[in-house]
Image: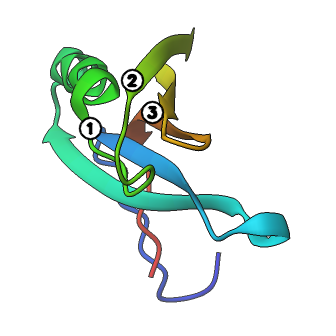
Amino acid sequence: MREGARVDVDGRWAVLIEEQGGSGEGRDWRLTEVRDVGHDRDGAVRLAETLAREYAPKHPWAPRGRAVYRAGEGVWLVVVAGATRSFHFRVTVAEHVATLD
């Protein structure tokens, strides 16, 4: 670790939302939201479940439905159907373990 770096291991929980971004061959995953939940992991899981069902992603513009999959402990993948194609986003419960300067 370089001199002057600070490591902050605070055990705080967050819900991360990653969405598809870009278009065509340039599509990628982008972290679009970080919601700090504090030290309550169970609260983070409840929030993540709610967001998987209710979060309004940037795309599609006019959603027609969604399929919610629990992909693992604290991870949901959501497929949102649009008028011409589907988009997906991921909701993850994550523990904040370090902040480095």
Task: Tell me: 6 left or right of 53.
Answer: right
State the residue at coordinates (38%, 57%): 58
Q: Tell which residue pokes out farthest to the bottom in this image.
A: 4
Which residue is farthest front? 83
How is the rendered protein coloured? Answer: rainbow
The residue type indicated by label 1 comes to Tyr
Vertical comparison of 19 with 7: above or below? above
The kind of residue tagged 3 is Thr
Q: Where does label 3 land, which residue?
A: 92
What is the CA distance from the residue labelled 2 to the residue labelled 3? 21 Å
The picture places residue 54, in percent across and down from the top left corner, at: 22, 29
Q: Position of residue 34 (x, y in %)?
A: 31, 54
Q: Quadrant of residue 91?
A: top left
Quarter of the figure that contains the N terminus = bottom right
Label 2 element class: strand
**In this view of the protein, which residue sits in the foreground, 2 or 31?**
31
SS label for mark 3? strand
Kind of residue sitting beneath label 2: Gly
The residue carrying mark 2 is 65
- Element under disc 1: loop
Mark in the foreground, 2 or 3: 2
Residue 90, x across and y down, in percent: 51, 36
Q: CA distance from mark 3 to mark 1?
A: 13 Å
Depicted 41 relative to depicted 2: above or below: above
- Of labels 2 and 1, earlier in sequence is 1
Report the residue marked by disc 1. Answer: 55
Q: Nearer the viewer, mark 3 or mark 1?
A: 1
Mark 2–mark 1 Cα distance, whole angstroms, equals 12 Å
Residue at 78% x, 72% y is 26
Whether residue 73 appears in this view of the structure is no
Q: Earlier in the sequence, mark 2 or mark 3?
A: 2
Q: Which mark is residue 71?
A: none
